[in-house]
Image (spheres, grey):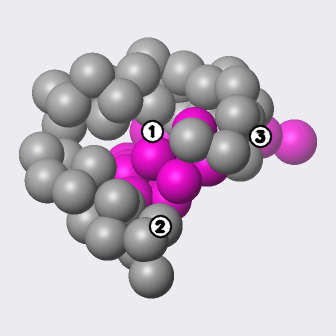
Amino acid sequence: MTNDNMPSYTLTFDDAVQIWLRHWNGEFQNRIAASFDVNPARVNEVLKERKHIGSREVALKKRAA
């Protein structure tokens, strides 16, 4: 049983890098969000670069490696 009064997970910068990589691999935002137990809007904030600025560039470097 889950406790709905508990706050959901807070995405970290490293999570944001993984979100970019998974997004580029064609994964849907809602599936990425479910795996982190966050609202899909939190994933969208990363992909719109409103949160964790710079994570896209780090993900690009990881992707190229």
Q: Is residue 3 located in the magenta-colored stretch of the structure? A: yes
Mark 3 surroundings: few (<14), some (14-19) or many (≥20) residues within 10 A: few
Q: Is residue 61 above or below residue 15?
A: below
In the picture provided, is 56 more to the left or to the right than 18? left
The residue to which callout 2 is attached is 63
Mark 1 surroundings: few (<14), some (14-19) or many (≥20) residues within 10 A: few
Q: Residue at x 12, y 45 (%)?
A: 53
For label 3, the SS is loop
Q: Which mark is residue 7?
A: 1
Q: Splitting the image into 4 quarters, where does residue 45 fall? A: top left
Q: Nearer the viewer, residue 15 or 26?
A: 26
Q: Which residues are magenta?
A: 1-23
Q: Is residue 5 located in the magenta-colored stretch of the structure? A: yes
Q: Residue at x 57, y 38 (%)?
A: 23
Hey, what amino acid is under mark 2? Arg
Residue 3 visible in rendering: no
